[in-house]
Image: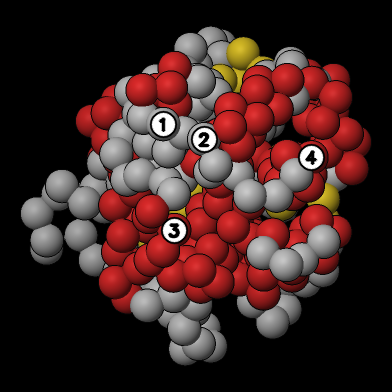
Amino acid sequence: MHSHSLDLKAITAEIAAEIAQATDRGRVADYIPALGAISPAHFGMAIVLADGTCHLAGDADVAFSIQSISKVFSLTMALGAVGDAIWKRVGREPSGSAFNSIIQLETERGIPRNPFINAGAIVVCDMLLGRYEPREAIGDMVRFVRSLADDGQSGDGDIVIDEHVARGEAETGFRNMALANYMRAFGNIHHPVEHTLGLYFHQCAIAMSCRQLALAGRYLMAGGRNPATGRSVVSAQRARRINALMLMCGHYDGSGEFAFRVGLPGKSGVGGGILAIAPGVASIAVWSPGLNERGNSQLGTLALERLVRKTGWSIFDPVP
Ligand code: DON
C-alpha cells in the first residue's frame, strides 16, 4: 500500500491505544540501575516517510538509552572509515546465540559472527579508534548521529551520552571485558581493551527519542542518502547490505522471530528501542522498555507487527 493512501495518524493512534492497554509488558533490563529505574509504562513511536512527513505517537519525544541500536551507526561509520576491509575482522552471519555470548569466538578464532552481537560491535569500535583517543572517537560518533537526526528544525543538539548509563556499563561490563580480552588474544583487538571498551560503553549510552532515531535512520530507507538534504551517508549498496544485516542479525537469536512477525530490517537495544526500516517507504522507531526473553522490546515488536499488518510495509508483502 502506498504511504500516501494510508491514514497513518489513525493507525499510529490505534496502535498506541492498544499498547497502552497491554498488561504483559515484558521485563525492563536491570543490569544497571539507570535502566532498571525506567517505567515499563512508556510507549513511543515515530514514523518518518520518504517525503519527510513525520507521524508521532505516545512518548515519541522522550529520550531513552538506545543501547545496541547504536551498533547500526557505528557500523555505518566504520564502513566509511575502513571500507570493506572490516569484513576481514567480523562476519556477516546470524549467530543464533545471545547478544553477549562468547562460545562461538573460540571455534571461530576471535572473529565475531556479525557486527551486531556485542563481540562484533566491540571489534567495530576498535576499528573506529584508529589513531584517535577514545574521547575524540566518542565525540565523532555523537556528532555523526546528530547530523543523521538533523531535520533542520526540531533540534538535534540534545542527543547526548547519558554519563550515568555509561558509568553503569563500565562498572558491570565484565562479559564485554571478557569478550574484548578474548578477541585481543586472537589479535582481533588492536588497541588497549580499555580504550576500545570506553568507546563501546559510551556508544551504548547514547540517549535519543523515537523521533530523533527515526530521523537518524532515514538514509537506510533511501538508498544511503539523507532524503531531506540529498547528501550521501553511505553508498546504495552499503545501505542495502546494512539492511540485510539488520534483518538477519538485528535481534540476535530472536532475529528469525522478528522477521517472521514483522518482516522488516530492524535493530533492537536493551533500553527497549527498535529501529525498523521499510526500504523506500519509512524509517520507524518504537520504544517500550519491557523486554522479552531474548532481550528485545516486547511491546515494541508487537507495535511493529500491528503496523506492518495495517500498512502492508513488510519487505515480504507484494509490491503494490
Ligand atoms: O553491552 C551490553 O551488553 C549492554 N550495553 C546491552 C547492549 C544491548 O542493547 C544488547 N541488546 N539487546
Q: Pointer 1: what residue? A: 109
Q: Which mark is residue 194?
A: 4
Task: Tell me where residue 61 appears, x and y as whole percent.
Answer: 72, 52
Distance Cα–Cα, label 2 vs label 3: 16 Å
Q: Mark 2 vs mark 1: which is more N-terminal?
A: 1
Mark 1 neighbour density, 10 Å: few (under 14) some (14–19) many (20 or more): some
Task: Tell me where residue 198 appears, x and y as whole percent.
Answer: 79, 44
Is 278 on the left or on the right of 118, as rendered? left
| Disc 2 and disc 1 in contact, CB within 8 angstroms | yes
Is 298 on the left or on the right of 254, as rendered? right
SS class, disc 1:
loop
Distance Cα–Cα, label 2 vs label 4: 17 Å
What's the residue at 58%, 27% (across, down)?
182
Question: Which residue type carries mark 4?
Answer: Glu
Mark 3 neighbour density, 10 Å: few (under 14) some (14–19) many (20 or more): some
Q: Which mark is residue 86?
A: 3
SS class, disc 2:
loop
Q: Mark 2 vs mark 4: which is more N-terminal?
A: 2
Q: Is residue 232 above or below residue 250?
A: below
Q: Mark 2 vs mark 3: which is more N-terminal?
A: 3
Q: Pointer 2: what residue? A: 186
Q: Which mark is residue 233?
A: none
| Disc 4 and disc 3 in contact, CB within 8 angstroms | no
